[in-house]
Amino acid sequence: MKLWGGRFAPGRRDPLFERFSESFSVDQRLVLYDLQVNRAYVRALGEARVLAAAEVRQLTRGLDRLRRYVETHPGWARGQASEDVHTWVEARLEREVGPVARKLRTGRSRNDLVATETRLFVKSEILNLESALAQLLASLLAEAKRHRSVVLPGYTHLQPAQPILFAHYLLAYFEMFQRDVSRLEDCRARADELPLGAGALAGTAFRLDRARLARALGFARVARNSLDVTSDRDFVCELLFACALALTHLSRLAEDLVIYSSPGYGFVELADAYSTGSSLMPQKKNPDSLELIRGKAATVLGKLTGTLALLKGLPLAYNRDLQEDKAALFDGLDTTREALLLAARLVRTLRLHPQRMKAATAQGFLTATDVADVLVSRGVPFAEAHAQVGKLVRYCDERQITFAELAAAEARRFIPFWDAKLRAVAASPEKAVRRRDVLGGTAPRQVARQLRAAEGTLETLRRRLPG
């Protein structure tokens, strides 16, 4: 069955082109949305007196029977041959209700139909992504609260920088993923408009109440321009961008944990459930889950890039190229959701080694800035304090000793003000952490405030999500 066959001579289809052009294998995923949209459209045609009341009832019952069939037969699409899901629905509906099914697409195109279904799908899937993000946020928050007093070496350029609380570190990722939730909400709001009634590109000739149709399908508003909305895939690109950025954040976390779980660091250990071994080396415990997350981030970035390239040269309005957006969208969403759920479980089961973190804070002179800051409080210009501490660091580094191992007489060669207080600051990463008591800083009091704010953010998100 073709929805457009009348114009073409029968029996002249190239089977290769038929296989090349079919989209049913991909867009069958939209079948319930197709049935939902068709049902609402049939009612709108009845209200516009394009269909008789009896026809509306007949078509509605047929669509309802199809929906029940699809919902109760998980393998409903197996062995089916159709150009796309819309063709399958119309052909199957005709088997259910007879020739009246041919009135189903009166005044409607596959262009506005698929645009409507894709937007409904996107709105639903964004909520699923937000739910997965909520689980990851909950895991990060739970671990931050559980280990709120653990001190971790902080790095810039992957070189030792300053001590921070491990909770502060986890909350940095909480902030990133919180922004991802916000971006998804923005995307959902922009996708929340009705294309149906736009026809192929110029709008329908039948006097449909599109505002009422929008309400019936749960859209916030009606698209203002039929030419734009039938070919618009900005919302697909936006969603793929939001997915790619969320996975970029997740990939950064994965990279950190790959490094921190290596024996050279030993700060954390992955649960066996999220690790694999080597087929050759019996001792190996590889962080494959984290490495796969990094790889999946690259894959979704590729989906975004491909979709942008797909759109960049298209003339208005609809072009068949747009068929390719569904595969990228579906795969990008599935990959992102699974990666987020996996990461939530992985974070929740991390085993920390605080003593390894503590030992690492003695390396790299993490308290050097705090020594300089104390000198500033004693009237030394920061540039001079910076130079004095830098020379002391070089001296210690050459002799492979820490600040704590430094004799007072040695220290005074570089810092005349060196005394017991400066030594205590230099030798205590905990003091350095407590000194960062500024809004947003890593001091325990500030981190406690951040934890309370994160709890409120998560609770607000959970209340907004269905179920």
Image (cartoon, helix red, strand yellow):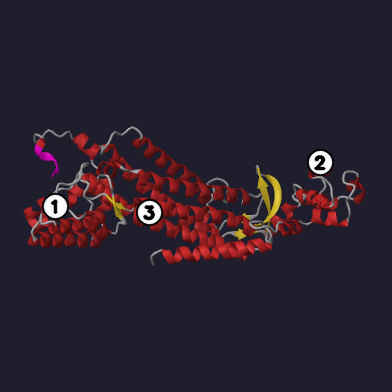
Residue 463 location (% of width, % of height): 44, 67
Q: Residues within 10 Å of mark 1 (few under 14, many from 20)?
A: many
Label annotation for residue 69: none
| 354 in the magenta segment | no
Image quadrant of residue 382?
top right
The quadrant of the picture occupied by the N terminus is top left
Q: Determine which residue is flagged by label 2.
A: 387
Alpha-carbon span between mark 1 and mark 3: 29 Å
Give the residue at x 36% y 44%. 234
Residue with the mark numbered 1 = 104
Crowding near the residue tagged with mark 2, few <14, some 14–19, many ≥20 C-alpha atoms within 10 Å? some
Q: Type of residue at label 3?
A: Ala
**Residue 269 visible within the image:** no
Tell me, for residue 189, which label it has, or none. 3
Residue type, mark 2 in image: Ala
Q: Secondary structure at mark 1?
A: loop
Q: Quadrant of the C terminus?
A: bottom left
Q: Which residues are the magenta region?
A: 1-6
Q: Residue at x 33, y 53 (%)?
A: 192
How many numbered marks appear?
Answer: 3
Nearer-N-terminus badge (2/3)? 3
Of circles 1 and 3, which is in front? 3
Q: Residue 243, image x and y in percent?
A: 44, 48
**Precedes in sequence: disc 1 or disc 3:** 1
Instruction: Report, in whole angstroms, how far the alpha carbon at label 1 lies from the one at label 2.
Output: 80 Å
395 left or right, relative to 330? right
Q: Is residue 217 above or below residue 393?
A: below
Q: Residue at x 15, y 48 (%)?
A: 107
